[in-house]
Amino acid sequence: MQFKQTTLDNGLEIIAEVNSNAFSLSLGYFVKTGSRDESLDIAGVSHFLEHMLFKGTPRRTSVDVNRQLDDLGSQSNAFTSEEQTVYYMSVLPENQFPALDLVTDMMRPSLRDDDFQTEKQVILEEIAMYDDQPPYGAMERAMEEFFGEHPLSTRVLGTKESVSALTAEAMREYHSARYAPNNLCLVATGAVDFDALVEETYRMTKHWKPAETGRKLTMPLARSKDVRMIHPPATQQYTLEFSPGPGYMDPQRYVSRVLATILGDDSGSRLFWELVDKGLADAAVCYTYEFQDCGVFGLYLAGDPDQQQENWDLIQSIVEDASGAPITERELELAKNKICAGILLASERPSNRLFSVGGTWLSRHQYETAAQVSQHYRSVSLEDVQKTFENLKDRTAVRVSVGPQLDS
Amino acid sequence: MQQLVYKHTLANGLTVLGEPMPWLESVAFTLMFPGGTAREGAQRLGLAGMTLELSQRGCGRWSSRDVVEQLDFLGVERSSSVSSFYTSISMSAMASVLETTFEVAVAMVREPHFPEEELEEVRQSALLELAAIEDDPAQKCFVELKRSRFSEPFGRSSLGSVQGVETVSHADCVEFHHRHAKPKGAVLSIAGRFDWDEFLKIVERNLGSWTGDASSDLGQVEPQVASVHIPHESQQTHIALAYDSVPYQHPEYYRGRGIVGILSDGMSSRLFTEVREKRGLVYAISASSHSLKNCGSVLCYAGTTSARAQETLDVTIDTIRSISSGIEPGELSRLKSRARTSLVMEQESSASRSSQLAYDWITLGRTTTRQEVLEEIEQLTAEKLIEHFSKYPPKRWTLVTIGPEPLEFHDAV
C-alpha cells in the first residue's frame, strides 16, 4: 500500500492509495461543494447539478455517458452531501484510462436546457419519495432548527419550491464558481497506475482555470427547541435530538464516536439493551455527524406513538446518567473492537477505501491507512469518554418528533 | 486467479463448502439450515423469525448478553435471516478469530437456551417491525407482491402477521427449531483466509455429532395472477410488478438473467433510459431475477407521483415487451462487460463469496465457478435472448400498488 499525491498547476489535487495486488481500482472526483455552499434561492442546486453531470458534455450526449459507464463494466454512482459532491467508479485496472477520460469529461457538462427540464422532474420525484418517509422529514427539520442561520441548515435536496424555481442559468453560474480545478480532488484507490493517472489528468485539465472558491466557516449558535410535526399516514412515532458535537478537525471526534457506540450503537449498546432488546422501541440509537467547522451528537428513537414519551424519558435518563453508571473498561474495549474491526473489514475493497481516503483528504488534507484510523480509536481513554459522557447532562438540544399524532 | 472450491459431506449429511481467498485478511461463513416461513403453521405466521431471534438470546456457554459481547469483542460482523425455506446465519471477521466465532454460531443452532422470560420481548420487537414497514411503502409493496404472487405458504414474509406473532408460544419456538434445524439438508460455506483441513477439523468437532433429517418437500410453487391496490395517503404511488421467467436452476437461466440485465442493469439499461432519462417519470426504477424453488420471476419496482403513475406503469410494461423487437449489439456487449467486471470484483469480498456458495448449493445442488458463469455469459447472443423471450414471454403478471389511487392493468386480472 503506497500513498501518492500531487497538485497540478491549476490547483487540481490528485491523490491515490496504490495497492498493486488489488483486483480493481476505484476513482472519483471529490468536489468541495454541497448544500452549505448554496444560497437559499438556489437551494438544492448542488444535488441537481450532480444529476446533470450525467446528462452529457460537448463531447458526449447523455446516452453516451450512460452507455460508456456501462461499457466499462463500472460500478458507478454519485452523491451529494452538505459539504461534498462525489462522482465515483470502480473498474478493472485495464480500464483506468477510459474511466478517467469519462469522469473527467463529466466535470465539464453541457447543462442543456431540455435535459435540465426533464431532470427537474426526476429531482421532484426524489423529493416526493423522501416526503413520504416521516423520519427523513424529521431529519431535515432537525437540521434546519439546529443550524438556524448557519449554512448547514439548507436541505441537500432543496425543496419542491426551490427546485421548481431553479433555472439552468443559475446552475451554470454555480457550476463555474464551484467546479474550478482548485476545488476538486481526484482520488484513486486499488490497482492504480499513478504516473499515468497524473499525466492523463494533466493533459485533459490543463486548460481549466482556477477560481476563488471559499466556504464560510462558522460555529453555529447552540439552540434549544422542541418541534412536533404530524404526518397523518405514519404508523410509528420518530423523535430526533441534535446537540453540538465535535467537527472533522477536532480530535475529540474519536471520543465522541466511541461514546455514541457505547451508549447507542444498534447492537450491544446501553440503549440497545434497555429499549430495543426489551421490545420497547423499534430503534433507539446515538450517532455523530461531522462537518468542517462543527458537528452533531444525535439521538434517534422510533416506536409505538403511545410509548414514545415513556421511551424518550428512559433515553434521557440513560444518556444523563454519567455519574450513576460510569463507562466501564469492558464497554470501552468492546466499542473499540467493534469500530476497528468494521474499519479493517471494510478496507479490503478499494471501493470502500476510496471514500475513506477521499473524505479524510477533503476534510483534513491528510492521508491515513486503515490501521492508522483504527489507532485513533484505540487511543481513546476511559477518562476522555467518561468526561464527554458527563457533559451530555448540560447539552443544549433541538428535538423534533413526527408521527400520526402530536405526542404528549 | 485460479478458483478452488472444496466440498465435504459429514456423516450426518451436512454439506461443507470452502473457497480459499488467501489474498484477504478476512474470513466469512454462512450456515443455512431448513426451516423457513413456509414451514410455519397457518396460525403462527412470524414463528420462523421469532424462533431465530430467540435462539440468539443465549446459547451454549454464553448468556444473551454474552453472545453479543463475545461477538463484539471478536469484532464480528453478523447477520441472520429467514426466507421461505431456510434460516441463515452469516458472520465475517478477521481470520485469527475464526474458531471462536464459529463456536458461537454453532451454539445458536445446536444449544440455544430459548429463555422463556424473553419471549414477550421478542414478540414486542416483532410487532414493532410489523408497524415499521407500514411507514416504508416501497418495502411493503414487495412484501405484498410476494404474498399475492406466491400465495400460501410460499409467499409469506419473515415479519409474519400481527395475529400470528401474538399467537406464537415458547413451546412453538422450541419445537420449530428442533424439528427443522437439522444437518441433512443444511449447508455450511466458508470463504476467505482459512485452512481447509483445519476448518474441517473444527467443523467435525462442533457439528459431527449433530443429527437429524430435513423435513419433507412442500411441493411446487405456482405463481398467481393478481392485481392488488393498497390505499395509502402518500405523494408517490409505489408500483411492484412480477411476471414469469425461468428459475436459477433452469438451463436457460442466464438468457433470462441477460434479458433482465438489458432491462435494468446500469444507467444505459432500457427501463432507466425510457422511464427515467427520457420521460423523467421516476427517481427509482428496477427489475431483478427472482427464484423461489421451481418458480422463476422477474420483479420490478417503480415509484412515482400519483398523477404520473398510470403512464409509468404503461411505459414500464411497453419497455419490457420491447425486448421482442430486438436487442442492439451494444446492449449485449455492455451486459457482458458488466458481468466480467463483477465476477472479478467478487474476489474482493469473502462475505459475498460465502453466501453465493451456500445459495448455489441449496438451489443447484452444486457450486459454480467464475469460469463457468463467464462462459455462459459469453455465449449469449441477441438471437438466443430473443428466442428465449418468445419461448418464455412475460405472462402471469402480478401487480401491487400502494398509493392514493389504483391503476388500470388488464393483463393482471
Image (cartoon, coloured by chain):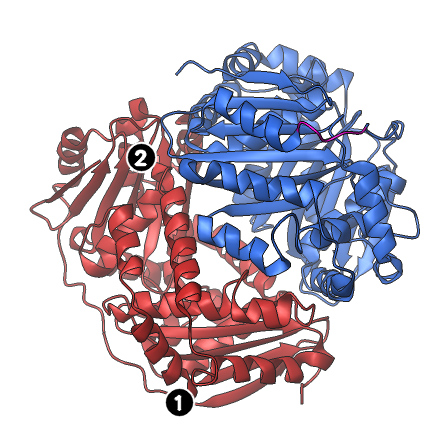
Chain colours: A red, B blue
Quadrant containing the N terminus of chain A is top left
- Indicate the position of residue A82 as horizontal and vertical percent values: 36, 65
Q: Main secondary structure of the magenta part?
A: loop
Q: Amino acid at mark 1?
A: Asp
Left or right: B274 as drawn, with respect to A156: right
Residue at image location 72% in from the left, 45% down from the top:
B313
Badge nearest the viewer, 1 or 2: 1
Mark linked to residue A394: 1
Sequence order check, earlier mark of 1 and 2:
2
Which amino acid type is marked by label 2? Leu
Residue B93 is situated, as x and y percent measured from the top left of the image, at 46, 41
Judging from the image, mark 2 belongs to the subunit labelled A
* Magenta range: B208-212
Determine the residue located farthest toward the left in the rendered image.
Answer: A9
Q: Choose between A191 and A73: the one closer to the eye.
A: A191
The C terminus of chain A appears in which quarter of the rendering? Answer: bottom right
Asked whether residue A113 appears in the rendered view, the answer is no
Q: Residues within 10 Å of mark 2 (few under 14, many from 20)?
A: some
Q: Which residue is mark 2?
A: A102
